[in-house]
Image (tube, rainbow, N blue to C red):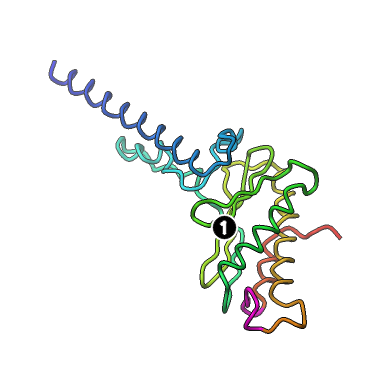
Amino acid sequence: MMTSLLGKRSAKIVATLLLALVASNHAVCNAFSLKSPSLAAGAGGTVCRGAPLYAAGVFGGLFGKKQTEDPNAPKRIFDVPVDSIKMGGLRFALGLHLIGQQGNPEKGTWKANEASDGILDMYFKDETGMFSVAMSENSISVDRYGPRPSLQYLLQESVLLHDFLDELQTLAFEGDDIEDENRLLKPKDGAIEKARESLPARKA
């Protein structure tokens, strides 16, 4: 009798924790989504930044099972290390660049958003993936979110990121009338070229 009661009580506690985790996940995703909440939960799985650990991974240890990898964990695409960076000006310039890319290759393909933490997010139209651009005093980093991004997403992401690196190249080196100390960024030697090597080759 006592064993039965304990089993029911344990099951009830686990069920309550699972419901709390699901509610927390929904709140976090909506906090980082655009105005349309559907963008936070695409067909390929939850696509947002800052989501909590996958439920199976959190509770797997309670039952002796191997912890499941969090499908919402980002995949680092590349880093561009820098010697110097003007954070405010560069964020503004790159934000304008990404807004201009929303219609590439056609209107509605991408939606740009600057999150409250200053990270620049790009959401794809099929809702299977997104990428984010984060800046620090030492580097510019690009991460992909989405457990199963579509082939179409991956192809268009590559196009946009090649253009993104072109924009960094322009801001860092082009324009003979701009003094080095006034540049928005100074990448380390070969950093942009190394980042480009992590992308599929662009079409000629």
Can you name the residue that lies furthest to the right here?
204
Residue drawn at x 30%, y 29% is 14
Badge 1 element = strand
Quarter containing the N terminus: top left
Q: Where 182 sits versus 64, above or below?
A: below
Q: How many marks?
A: 1
Residue drawn at x 32%, y 40% is 61
Q: Which residues are magenta?
A: 180-189
Is 121 on the left-hand or right-hand side of 11? right
Of 12 and 42, nearer the camera is 42
x%, y% of residue 33?
Answer: 55, 41
x%, y% of residue 76?
Answer: 57, 58
Q: Where 163 sits versus 66, above or below?
A: below
x%, y% of residue 23?
Answer: 40, 32
Residue drawn at x 18%, y 23% is 6
Q: Where 23 sits versus 194, above or below?
A: above
Is 185 on the left-hand or right-hand side of 60? right
The residue beneath circle 1 is 76
Q: What amino acid type should be assigned to the residue bearing mark 1?
A: Arg
Q: Where 200 sits versus 79, above or below?
A: above
Of 190 and 106, nearer the camera is 106
x%, y% of residue 162?
Answer: 73, 61
Question: Is residue 196 part of the magenta span, yes or no?
Answer: no
Can you name the residue that lies furthest to the top here?
1
Quarter containing the C terminus: bottom right
Q: Which picture quadrant has residue 45? A: top right
Is 52 on the left-hand or right-hand side of 169? left
Of 120 and 16, nearer the camera is 120
Residue drawn at x 78%, y 42% is 107
Query: Quick one: label 1, few (<14), some, or many (20+) residues within 10 Å?
Result: few
